[in-house]
């Protein structure tokens, strides 16, 4: 086995998420990558992704791995070969040969997501695919104070999509950064994320920023484990998977 670790970026607008939805005919990032790599290999190739990004969500640092055994393409040339076939909204960035037991998802120690908010009175059509247009004033200080309650290891049941089956909702958030401006960027770095977790966290922090409740209420929502107490799920287009770590992320 020749286990290749490939970092890819994509605009998720036209895709029904990363994960292949076999038998549905719906376009997915995984499906396109597998078709491309299978064409290069002249055999069926299956890929494993580090993160199962939702429909409409983007990535700048998604990581996949796959078996390139029998290929005659040098490892460092795989991105060049792949980009000659991939559509323009997906790009292979870099590749390297990984140990045989490397698994893009299960070997990951942390991931970082970024959520972008266009906080302005006038919409910008060139930002609409990659940010949430939000024309209302936000208190960034209160949002930062609320975010501080979320850092650490907690049961994040209140911040996952209702009905999501998981063995445990315990996750550790290492850091939440909020960079202000007309373009507000929220960065979430953690050892793992539940389904829709980042988007629900963003929706909740927006409510704090709008003064709907004080920052400490986020701690009460977290402790309750009740999804109905948290904010709305923020739209997907503002979210991007930025980086995946395979060593100490702290």
Image (tube, rainbow, N blue to C red):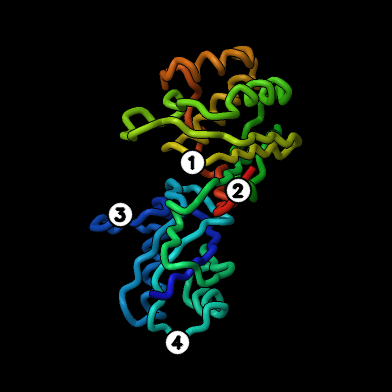
Q: Earlier in the sequence, mark 3 or mark 4?
A: 3
Q: Which is more foreground, mark 1 or mark 3?
A: 1
Q: Which mark is residue 21?
A: 3
The local secondary structure at tag 2 comes to loop
Q: Position of residue 136 (x, y in %)?
A: 66, 25
Report, in whole angstroms, how far the alpha carbon at label 1 lies from the one at label 3.
22 Å
Q: Which is more foreground, mark 2 or mark 4?
A: 2
Classify 10 Å Cα crowding around label 2: few (below 14), some (14-19), many (20 and above). few
Is 41 rendered above or below residue 55?
below
According to the image, label 2 marks what residue? 248
| Viewport quadrant of the C terminus | top right
Q: Earlier in the sequence, mark 3 or mark 2?
A: 3
- State the image quarter where residue 208 is shown: top right
| Viewport quadrant of the N terminus | bottom left
Q: Position of residue 13 (x, y in %)?
A: 49, 52
According to the image, label 4 marks what residue? 72
According to the image, label 1 marks what residue? 192
Closer to the camera in the image, 219 or 130: 219
Report, in whole angstroms, how far the alpha carbon at label 2 lies from the one at label 4.
34 Å
Give the residue displayed 48% in from the left and 16% down from the top.
223
Give the residue displayed 39% in from the left and 57% down from the top.
28
């Amino acid at each position: 086995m020749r286990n290749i670790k490939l970092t890819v970026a994509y605009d998720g607008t036209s895709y029904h998420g990363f994960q292949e939805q076999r038998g549905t005919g719906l376009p997915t990032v995984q499906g396109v990558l597998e078709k491309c790599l299978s064409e290069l290999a002249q055999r069926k190739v299956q890929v494993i992704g580090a993160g199962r990004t939702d429909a409409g969500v983007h990535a700048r640092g998604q990581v996949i791995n796959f078996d390139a055994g029998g290929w005659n393409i040098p490892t460092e040339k795989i991105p060049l070969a792949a980009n000659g076939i991939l559509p323009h909204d997906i790009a292979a960035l870099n590749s390297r040969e990984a140990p045989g037991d490397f698994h893009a998802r299960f070997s990951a120690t942390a991931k970082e997501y970024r959520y972008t908010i266009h906080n302005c009175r006038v919409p910008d059509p060139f930002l609409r695919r990659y940010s949430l247009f939000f024309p209302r004033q936000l208190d960034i200080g209160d949002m930062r104070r609320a975010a501080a309650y979320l850092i650490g290891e907690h049961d994040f049941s209140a911040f996952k999509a209702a009905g999501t089956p998981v063995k445990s909702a315990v996750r550790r958030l290492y850091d939440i950064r909020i960079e202000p401006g007309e373009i507000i960027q929220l960065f979430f770095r953690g050892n793992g994320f539940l389904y829709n977790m980042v988007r629900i966290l963003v929706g909740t922090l927006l409510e704090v920023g709008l003064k709907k409740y004080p920052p400490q209420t986020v701690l009460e929502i977290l402790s309750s484990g009740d999804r109905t107490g948290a904010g709305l799920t923020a739209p997907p287009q503002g979210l991007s998977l930025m980086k995946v770590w395979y060593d100490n992320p702290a």
